[in-house]
Image (cartoon, grey):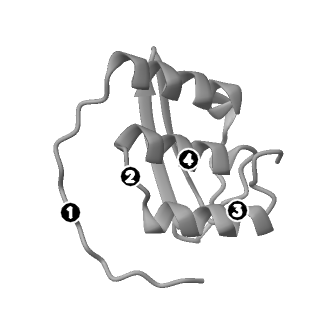
Amino acid sequence: MEKFQSVTKAFDLQPTAEEWTAFRRSVESIGIWEWSNGVDPGQPDFWHLRICLDGHDLDIGGTYFDRKGWNTFASSIETLIRRKSPILEASKRAGEGAGGGNGG
C-alpha cells in the first residue's frame, strides 16, 4: 500500500449545475445508495464516506476498496473537484485488485 504524507489543502470550488447532474448520474449508475458498511468489527475504517444528496443520506466506511463501481465513484469525485487526487488514484488501483473496479 502506498503511503502519503498528510497534507490538507483547501480550495474554493463551486461545481456547476451540469457537473452536479453528471455526478448524480454517475453515482446512481453504480448503485451507491445500496452500498453498506464494510468495516470488520473491531477494525478501524480505512475510508469513510458521507453523501447527502437528493434526499439520500449515506454514511458508510470500509476496510477495503471492494465496492462495485468504486473506480467510477473515485473518478466522479475527481471530475467534480476538477483535479486528480493521489489518494483516489491509489484507491482505484487497490480497488481493481479487490474487486471494486467498474464492473464489480
Circle 3 Cα neighbour tier, 10 Å, few/some/many (<14 / 14–19 / ≥20)? many
Name the mark nearer the viewer: 2 or 3.
2
Task: State how far apart marks 2 and 3 are (Cα).
Answer: 20 Å
- The residue to which callout 3 is attached is 95
In the figure, 80 relative to 43: above or below? Answer: above
Secondary structure found at label 1: loop
Q: Is residue 103 visible?
A: yes
| Amino acid at circle 4 | Ser
Mark pair 3, 4: CA separation: 12 Å
Number of the label disc, if any, that sits on residue 75: 4
Q: Are marks 2 and 4 in contact (CB under 8 Å)?
A: no
Q: To which quarter of the image does residue 20 belong?
A: top left
Q: Is residue 5 left or right of residue 55?
A: left
- Residue 57 vs 68, above or below: the answer is above
| Camera-nearest residue between 98 and 43 | 98
User: Label 1, label 2: how many angstroms apart (C-alpha)?
Assistant: 12 Å
Question: Is residue 57 rendered to the left or right of residue 28?
Answer: left
Give the x, y percent position of residue 81: 36, 43
Which residue is label 2 attached to? 83
